[in-house]
Image: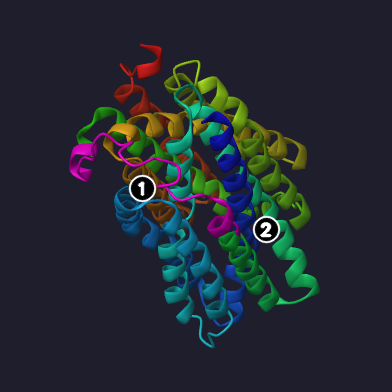
Amino acid sequence: MNQSSSGILFLLSVSVGVAMIGLGIIWPIIPVYAVELGAGGFLVGLIIASFNIARTFFNPLAGRFSDKLGRKKFIVTGLFAYAVISIFYVLPTRAETLVLVRFFHGMTSVLVVPIAMALAADIAPKQKLGLYMGTLNMSVMLGLGIGPVLGGLIRDHIGMNAAFYSMGGLAFLTGVLVMIFIPSEKKRNLSGKISGMVSFKEMLKNRVVLGIFLMRFFTASGQGAVYTFLPILALQMNLTSSQVGIILGANIFLIASLQRAMGNLSDRINPKYFIISGTFASGLIVFGMPFVQGFTMILFLNILMGMANGLALPGGLVITGQLGRKMGMASLMGITDAAWSLGMIVSPILSGIILDLFGLSQVFIIGSCLILIGSVAVTFFLRDYQPDELV
């Protein structure tokens, strides 16, 4: 079991990591592309938000169907859909069309990472759930960190359309890899692994699930402000675009580098402690960002933020995986991922209003408060949580 599942984890990590490089390639390009097609500020925001709007609505549904019908077919379908959607990115002559393209892209994206996370949890030996989840999430974060760098190089040297085709090509390649090399559920004898599935309403009545849901929503609402408005803050500090790239890259790569180690620790120590401490630390760090000056200090704070998020993230995945074995793995992961997507919808809208009314510094201060609210919520709802393995 261990050798077989570790091999599947390796193939799954490589496949999802490569697919996320493709997704990351177009991440920083979308706003520029929208402006080139004539979009104003509101339309750019709507284009970006439409991706997460689709994820919020379709994540739980995709997870529920995956629990009933199997993982592999959903992952393969999502990857091939990425490849097809890359063609639709280059066709629009009006920016408004990108709203639909991004919506459908968000809808198909729920078939890949959340379902792959559920598959990793399915195959994980009981005492290695955190290690497996952390390993796969490390691949996701590394892909998203590498992608924007490649996207900028491709756009500068080959052209905008080449970036979209690159995303499509990588998605097609990984779809083929998953289809050929990852065995189906029947061959892995996973049928009947879930003892029973509960309704979404019952899931959210569970105090631990509700705590994770609220934490992910408030954390996304606060951290989204950092990722959206840090370039503007950096502009006020007279930093270059390259320096901004280094700052954000350091943040993301530190999150990625800690996933496997912290996942392994979460198998041995109650993961709620890592979630609470990491989320609280992240909130305090974001609070300090508008009060420092210069590249070195803002880089230092982003390094600390990456470490804090790297501490918290695997613990949430482990608890979700432990509960998912009883409630429905992908269904529960779909709900918690939808909470993150919902926060990413709220964040740019709320932050934009705060910016207009109160100024840039308040965007980070209120973002910090939202993250701290998430840390308080998860502390309250997880106060009595004990993993079955540690009871």
Please provide percent x and percent y for residue 294.
75, 41
Give the label on residue 211, or none: none
* Residue nearer the viewer, 221 or 355: 221
Residue under the point 74% across and 47% down:
246
Q: Is 129 situated above or below 219? A: above
Using the image, determine if residue 366 lies above or below residue 261.
below
Q: Is residue 29 left or right of residue 318?
A: right
Give percent across and percent down for residue 211. Answer: 32, 31
Judge by depth and name the residue closer to the eye, 303 or 322. Answer: 322
Q: Which is more toward the observer, 174 or 53? A: 174
Element at label 1:
helix
Instruction: Name the residue rendered at 58%, 53% in the picture.
Output: 181
Secondary structure of the magenta portion, mostly?
loop
Q: CA distance from mark 2 to mark 1?
A: 25 Å
Q: Mark number for residue 148?
A: 2
In the foreground, 5 or 154: 5
- All told, the count of numbered labels is 2
Residue 334 disc label: 1
Q: Which residues are magenta?
A: 177-203
What amino acid is labelled 1 in the image?
A: Gly
